[in-house]
Amino acid sequence: MPPPRFSFTQIRTADVLKELKNLDPYKSAGLDNLDPFFLKLAAEIVATPITSLFNLSFVTPEIPRDWKAAAVIPLFKGGDTLDPNCYRPISILPCLSKVFESQVNKQITDHFESHPTFSAMQSGFRAGHGCTSATLKVLNDIITAIDKRQYCAAVFIDLAKAFDSVNHRILIGRLNSLGFSNDCLAWFTNYFSERVQCVKSEGLLSGPVAVSMGVPQGSILGPTLFSVYINDVALAAAGSTSMRTTPFCIHPAFHWTLC
């Protein structure tokens, strides 16, 4: 049975207005220098044209290039100041791109929850799920295996730089298999294309560097898209996997005999 189709619907001005009014005015502006304080202050005036711009993006389907540029701020964690591994990168995206992604993400997650898409083992970035639900699932499976006189081996896997490892072509294929329309696929193809990032430190800004892999760090859509990307892991493991994005746990059970 084919999956239910998903297509974008028109974003409402009222929803954008609500997002703008709820912006944190103390957040940093992105490389476009559009301050969230200004957007919050002018929300009633700019909500309508911004909504029109969002909906036009669905039709074209293109995303303004400025919204795909991230400023990366290196946050020192301690240790050797000359060692890049001692810094944690903080990615700052343009404010409007995050408002737009929030609306897109709501449409996608509402569709996924109303048409069960994710494996029951998937606990990452889902409403009503989290570390607790994933842990309870693993413990329940282990106890059940013991009660049935089975061994249960658990393998915990932590993916280094998991978000950065996503292959865009494979992810688009995943979305296609989940029933996303051709217009949606074209929009996401553009979403991933021509992305750049610059390092910003002590008032200085590096030149742009192309980003050809991964879901955008600091984005609203990133966690949902990564959950889509790894969802097939649980399906391939025949239900013996518990995942909370990363790390995830594979715990197959097999029969044993007590002597």
Image (cartoon, rainbow, N blue to C red):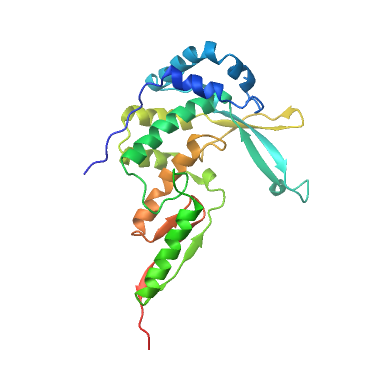
Q: Residue at x 59, y 29 (%)?
A: 93
Question: In this view, which residue lies farthest toward the bottom?
Answer: 259
Q: Residue at x 44, y 50 (%)?
A: 123
Quadrant location, the N terminus: top left
Residue 123 in the image: above or below residue 12: below
Visible residue check, residue 166: yes
Q: Quadrant of residue 227?
A: top left
Visible residue check, residue 33: no
Question: In this view, which residue lies farthest toward the left?
Answer: 1
Question: In this view, which residue lies farthest toward the top?
Answer: 45
Measured from the top left, where is residue 113 in percent x and y?
36, 40
Residue 32 in the image: above or below residue 199: above
Quadrant location, the C terminus: bottom left
Measured from the top left, where is residue 223 in percent x and y?
49, 41
Q: Residue at x 51, y 26 (%)?
A: 99
Measured from the top left, where is residue 38 in percent x and y?
62, 17
235 relative position to 15: left or right: left
Q: How many marks?
A: 0
Q: Quadrant of residue 147?
A: bottom left
Viewer-proximal residue among 150 and 30: 150
Viewer-proximal residue among 206 and 37: 37
Measured from the top left, where is residue 116 in percent x and y?
32, 44
Q: Residue at x 30, y 40 (%)?
A: 115
